[in-house]
Amino acid sequence: MEKNLDSKKIENSKKSTNENNKKTNKKFVIFILALLIIVGGFTAISNDNQSQINYNNNVYQQIPVNQYNVKIHIDFTENVLFSKYNVILSVGAEKITLTHGENKDLEVTLEEGTHTLYFKNAEDSSIQTETTLDVDCNMEVGYSISCHYDKISVTNLYIDKDEAVGENEAEIKNDKTEFVSKNYKEVIEKLKEIGFTNIVEKPIYDIVSSVYSEGEVENVTINGIDTYKRGDIFDKNVEVVVSYHLLQSSDPSKIKAPYDSESAKEVNYADVVKAFEDAGFKNIITEEKTETDMWGNKDGAVSSIIIAGSAADKNKGYNSYDEVTIYYYDITSSGRSETQLSSGYAQLAFEKYGESIYKYGFKCHWLIGLINEEQRPDGSWFIKVEVTIKNAFGTEYDTIAEGIVSGSDANPKVTQFYVSQ
C-alpha cells in the first residue's frame, strides 16, 4: 500500500516537472521570437531612416569623391648671392622639395574641392606662403616663386583647365610673352589658329636705328587687355590688336629725305635744294660755309644737312613743314706753298690717307683728340691723334693713329702711317 503511494507521488512529481519544463521552454521560445521581432524592427526602422536621410540630405551618402589629375609647373627665380634656400611645396598628401633656382614640373592627384598649397623655407618653416587652388577637373597650373630673407613670393602664371572650348570661344595657350618681339605676321597666324577672327593691325612707324627689327611685335591686346594668361577663354569675335614696329621712313603720312650729309658731300647745293623741293619739303634754308681751298672741298658742294634740328637721315620720315638747312662751301684761295708744308695741309693729307685705307669710315678727332703734332727739322710733321674707324658691318671702334707727313702744301705725302689695334 505504501509502495503504491510512493509510486504515485513520484509519477505526479515527474508530471509536474515535465509541465514546468514545457512552460519554461515555451517562455524561452516566446522570448527569442520577441527579441528577433524587436531587433528586426529596429533594423527596418534604421534602414528606413537611413534611406530617408540619403534621399533628403545627400551630405550623408557614401558617394565616391571625384579625383583629378593636376600638373603643376614651377618657375623658380634664382638669387645670385642671398636667400638661396630650397622650398618645400605641400599639397594634399604630397611634399615636394623645390631646389633653389631650378624650374620643376610635377603631377599630383587631388580630390574635387579647394586645396591649399603651402610653400615653406626648407631651412626655416616660419617663412611660409600659401595659395589656394579650386579643383573641379583635370588641369595644368603654373606658379612663379622667388625667395626673400623674410618671405616667399608666389605668383600664379596660369590655370589651364581640361574643359571643352565652346564653338564661339578661343582659349589662350600662353601669356603675351608668346607674342612680344616676334614678327607680326607669325603672331597673326598663331592668333588665327587659336580661333580669333577680329584681328586688327596697328603699325608703329618709329624705327630709325637697330633698336627694333622691322615688323617686331610690341604688344597684343585681347578685348582691350594685355594681362591675359594661359587658359583664359574669350569670345573668338572680340577685337585683338597687334602693335608692331616699322621703319619711320615707311610711314605713309611722312616724307623721306632724298639726301643726308654723307650722300650729298660731292653734290652742288642747288641740286640738293631741288631734290628736297621735289620730295615735298616746304621750308628749305641755305647757308654758306666759307673755307679755304686747303681742305680740298669743292666750291658750292654741300657741307652738311640739318632737318628739324638734327642731322638728316634718309631712313627717317619727316613732316613737309620741318625746317631743312643745307650748308655748302664757299671756297677762297689759301695760296698753297710749293716748298713748305703747313700743319693744316699735313692734317688733311693724314686723314685722307686713312680714308683711303679704311673705306667704310675713318675720322680724326683733331679738336679734342690730338695727342701730339710736331714739325721735324726736315719740315715734315709727326702726327698722333685719336680716330674712329667703321668696318664693313657698320660697327665703329675708337683707336689711335700716328704717322709722318712730308712734302709741301701743294703736294703733301704720308710717308709713315700706323693704327693701334
Image: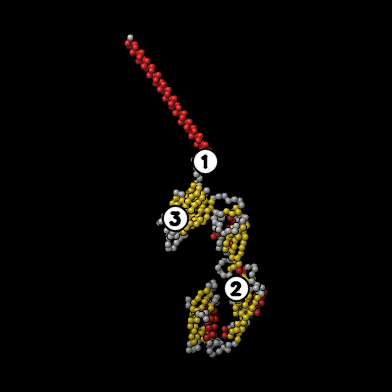
Label number found at residue 128: 3
Q: Are marks 2 and 3 in contact (CB under 8 Å)?
A: no
Residue farthest bottom in this picture = 339
**First of labels 1, 3 by sequence position:** 1
| Residue 363 vertical placement versus 63 (above, below) | below
- Residue 58 is marked as 1
State the residue at coordinates (49%, 87%): 375
Rate crowding at label 3 as few (under 14), some (14 to 19) or many (20 or more) other CA atoms within 10 Å. some
Q: Would you name the residue on which mark 2 appears?
A: 313
Quadrant of residue 127 within the rendered picture: bottom left
SS class of the residue under badge 1? helix
- Circle 1 residues within 10 Å: few <14, some 14–19, many ≥20: few
Residue at 42% over, 25% down:
28
**In the rendered structure, which amino acid carries the disc numbered 2?**
Asp
Mark 3 belongs to which amino acid?
Gln
Say if residue 323 shows up in the picture.
yes
